[in-house]
Image: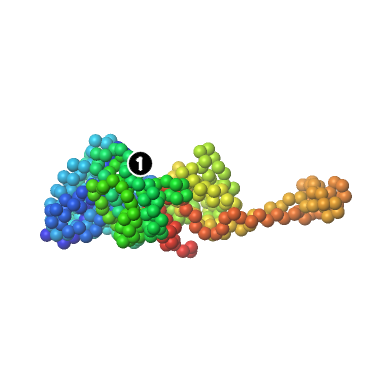
Amino acid sequence: MVSFMRIAIDDTDSPEGMCTTYLGAVLVRRLEDAGYTITDRLLVRLNPNVKWKTRGNAAVCIEAEGGEPERAFAIACDAVDEFADLGAENTHPGLVVAPTLLPPDFYQKAVTGFCTLEEAEAVLRRHGALYRGWKLGRGLIGATAAASADFTDWTYELLAYRDPSERGDREVERESLFTSEEKTFPHTWDTVDRANDCIVCFPNTPDPVLFGIRGESPEWVLRARSFVISEEPVMEEMFRTNQGTDAHLIDASLAGVEEGLSYRVMGTVATTPSTGQGGHVTFELEDADARVTCMAYEPTKGFRDMVRSLAPGDELLVTGSYKNGSINLEKIRIITCPPIVTTRPPLCPECGRRMKSDGKNKGWKCRRCKTHTNTPETVTTERTITPGWYEVPPSARRHLARPLCRRKEPKLQ
């Protein structure tokens, strides 16, 4: 009998239905019925820029003890066969049962970068793990990453589920969700988006998730859940997760950014922000060695107003994913935003009229009084923004992005 094992699954869902966390919750109950003791339940978010992800690129890992890995593997295989959406073209499940903790560097690479199926299988063989892939087996990458996850920071999410056969509207009382957030924020977050008057805590896809509550501890999550009024869930599960931790971010210079990775970078605003087609706002950020486009997309709503208020010379720290040649903004820290100083032709000291240019580099001259000066009038415009952190609204926030209410942002170097 093995005292410790990790059972991990990934890529069992599709846009048409199912949810890997639901399958994980079912597997928890089947393992418990078989006599295993469940010691942890992990919801592991991986690189959000992986092109073949279904929705939030999440894998599930269950820590268990009190039984044989081979039996747990058989139970898990049966569950995947029964619940995974194997008919979906892009669903390629993977299952891992590891009797030891796999190297955490594989998880770290999977959450910040890209791993191959060959790399995953090499890790599994080297450490004697049991594993199986369905169809192309691409889910083995996420399952291996989940089995090797070693969080340095974590939060919790309670997920309530409806029957997987349900495809209609979710019966969750809207006002109860706003009450839940009001009573427990900032210890829980992203239940609703108050600024945009919308619900965040359940998907619009036809999967089994009824709603989810995210927070800093099981106690606060359960308190928030107590306010929610809904149809009776068929099942609920609490996961420990890397959501809301910024685990996907890499510290880098602007010259070092690569396509498909997510960064925390510093620089100076180089161009006045502009609003393009569709309402997207862009500006250029530069440092001593490079210049990169930053974008605030339309779904970030009011966050774009702050971006529009930036000006050349402002010093920033920004976070976001580098995709299609630009950083898609998640958060901005304004380090400095000094008053904007401009010049214009001065007033004539004799008659008070605005003076005119006397020619290139020749100063200004009053056409009436013939008064001349080389000193322009200086105009100082105070800013509508102040130094500090700004973030996209909950409705536009990625699962991994750390909300400012957690107040654990890294110090500037």
Q: Which residue is mark 1?
A: 204
Query: Across the whole image, how many numbered discs are drawn on residues?
Result: 1
Task: Report if residue 139 is visible in the image.
Answer: no
Q: Residue at x 82, y 52 (%)?
A: 352
Task: Report if residue 183 is visible in the image.
Answer: yes
Q: Amino acid at mark 1?
A: Asn
Q: Which residue is at the front of the view, 225 or 400? A: 225
Where's residue 353, x and y in %?
Answer: 82, 49
The N terminus lies in which quarter of the figure? Answer: bottom left
Q: Residue at x 34, y 56 (%)?
A: 224
Q: Secondary structure at mark 1?
A: loop
Where's residue 175, x and y in %?
Answer: 39, 49
Q: Is residue 199 above or below residue 250?
A: above
Q: Residue at x 17, y 59 (%)?
A: 37
Task: Give the left or right position of residue 299, taking residue 270 as reference.
Answer: left
Q: Residue at x 45, y 50 (%)?
A: 194
Q: Which residue is at the front of the view, 182 or 139? A: 182
Residue 406, quarter of picture: bottom left
